[in-house]
Image (cartoon, helix red, strand yellow):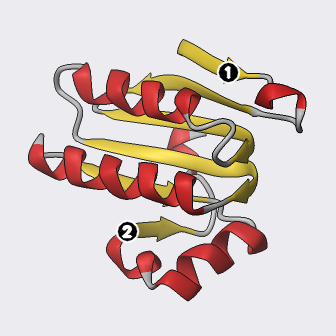
Amino acid sequence: MAVDAYGTDGGGEGPGLTATLRRRGGVVVVVTVGELDHDSPEPLRRALDQALGQGGVERIVVDCTGLVFCDSTGLNILLKGRLDAKAAGTALELAGLRPPVARMFEITGARGLFTVHPQLPAELA
């Protein structure tokens, strides 16, 4: 069940980004679709803030299956989200990184900072 959804039209430059939240017990899944770049950071930023604001959250899993692009702006949002989650006593994990997005994490060395699932775990789908 969707908790909330955030989206942007990407300023007319591209598909933009949507971030939809749903909760499964102590896990919040943030489903991202589109391009996460300097034109569209707010949907993910708001979604992560909302996820962290919910009580009893053990893990936040960002489902990147629908994320087709991520630049340094998006990477910074995820890195900040990881730090915020850690400060709140929870974990921020990633799932389903497509090759262009996975490459960003590989070349920056950021992949080693996250638990990365090859796909969204079945119990969270």
- Residue 41 image offset from top left, x and y in percent: 57, 37
| Left/right of residue 46 with respect to residue 81 in the rendered view | right
On screen, residue 26 versus residue 60, left or right, reads left
Front tag of 2 and 1: 1
Q: Foreground residue, 52 or 36?
A: 36
Q: Which is more N-terminal, label 1 or label 2?
A: 1
- Look at the numbered disc 2 and give the secondary structure of its residue: loop
Residue 84 shown left or right of residue 23 in the figure: left
Type of amino acid under label 1: Gly
Q: Quadrant of the C terminus?
A: top right
Q: Residue at x 25, y 19 (%)?
A: 54
Which class describes the residues within 10 Å of circle 2: few (<14), some (14-19), or many (20+)?
some
Above-or-below relation of 40 to 91:
above
Mark 2: amino acid: Phe
Which numbered circle lies on residue 114? 2
Q: Is residue 71 above or below residue 22?
A: below
Tell me: residue 2, above or below residue 15: above
Q: Position of residue 123 (x, y in %)?
A: 51, 43
Q: Are marks 2 and 1 in contact (CB under 8 Å)?
A: no
Residue 24: name its quadrant.
top left
Instruction: Please identify the quadrant where the N terminus is shown.
Output: top right
On the question of residue 25 being in view, the answer is no
Instruction: Please identify the quarter of the rendering in which residue 68 is found.
Output: bottom right
| Residue 7: mark | 1
Asked whether 81 or 1 is in front, the reply is: 81
The residue that appears at 65% across and 64% down in the rendered structure is 97
Element at label 1:
strand
Task: Estimate the x, y position of residue 79 in percent, counting from the top left.
Answer: 36, 58
